[in-house]
Image: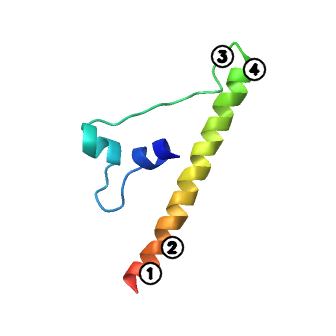
């Protein structure tokens, strides 16, 4: 979860927290559709991709919720 949070662009600054601290984008891309020798490794990569997508959606919903409170 920390990776997803630190690697997502901030709505305030439009850059990720990681970029703000290190001045470069941390990009870990996994392509589970390519040839992966182990089916367990492929399943793990797919699970990580789904987890990151879910976490990004949850963080986005939380930001929208708190934004409404802030704007009120």
Q: Which residue is mark 4?
A: 39
Mark seen at residue 65: 2
Q: Secondary structure at mark 4?
A: helix
| Picture quadrant where residue 18 is located | top left
Q: Secondary structure at mark 3?
A: loop
Q: Nearer the viewer, mark 3 or mark 1?
A: 1
Compared with 36, 32 (above or below) is below
- Which label's residue is closer to the chain start, 3 or 1? 3
Spot occupied by residue 5 in the image (x, y as percentages of width and height)? 45, 49
Residue lying farthest to the front in this orientation = 2
Left or right of 58, for residue 63: left
Q: Secondary structure at mark 2?
A: helix
Q: Which residue is mark 3?
A: 35
| Picture quadrant where residue 11 is located | bottom left
Mark seen at residue 69: 1
Label 2: few (<14), some or many (≥20) within 10 Å? few
Disc 3 vs disc 1: Cβ atoms closer than 8 Å?
A: no
Label 3: few (<14), some or many (≥20) within 10 Å? few
Q: How much space separates mark 3 and mark 1, taking CA atoms? A: 47 Å
């Amino acid at each position: 979860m920390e990776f997803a949070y630190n690697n997502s662009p901030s709505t305030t600054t439009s850059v990720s927290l990681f970029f703000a601290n290190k001045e470069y984008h941390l990009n870990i891309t996994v392509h589970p559709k390519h040839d992966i020798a182990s089916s367990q490794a492929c399943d793990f990569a797919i699970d990580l991709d789904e987890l990151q997508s879910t976490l990004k959606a949850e963080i986005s919903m939380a930001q929208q919720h708190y934004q409404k409170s802030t704007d009120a």
